[in-house]
Image (cartoon, rainbow, N blue to C red):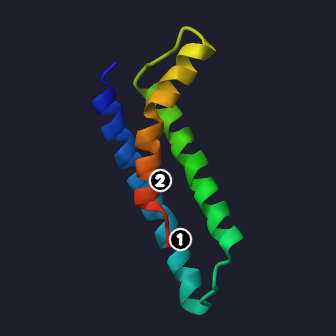
Amino acid sequence: MNIELIKTELAQRVEQLVIKRKTGKKATMKVVHKVKTWSDKVAETEDLIHKVYHTLHEVLQQNGIHFKNEIEKETFVNFMEPTVNDLVIKNMID
């Protein structure tokens, strides 16, 4: 398992995901400029976190990476957590 390759692929896929989210929102933002509440921002961030983890699992599957058990999988996900956090912070919409 090449972890750097997985990190790179994950970062690229998250970037594509965020681009899709931004382009989808521009059309509605032209019509009405809605001021987001704190809870809206938190919900959007939580949604992004879930999507990043979902993307991580997709990347692992596409690279044929399978874990022996749930503990091994959770250990890897915990290892990847700083990368996931960096990607979420980098791609949060203000």
- Residue 91's x, y, as percent? 43, 60
The residue labelled by disc 1 is 24
**Above or below: residue 36 compared with residue 8:** below
- How far is disc 2 from disc 1 in space, using C-alphas? 18 Å
Rendering quarter of residue 89: bottom left
Q: The disc labelled 2 sits on which kind of residue?
A: Val
> Which residue: 40% across, 58% down?
90
- Residue 11's x, y, as percent? 36, 46
Rendering quarter of residue 62: top left
Please tell me how crowded label 2 is: few (under 14), some (14-19), or many (20+) other residues with Cα within 10 Å: many
Position of the N terminus by quadrant: top left
Disc 1, SS? helix
Task: Say which of marks 2 and 1 sits in front.
Answer: 2
The residue labelled by disc 2 is 88
Q: The disc labelled 1 sits on which kind of residue?
A: Gly
> Which residue: 52% across, 14% down?
67
| Front one among 61 and 69 | 69
- In the current view of this chain or complex, which residue is farthest to the top? 68
- Residue 39's x, y, as percent? 70, 68
| Front one among 88 and 27 | 88
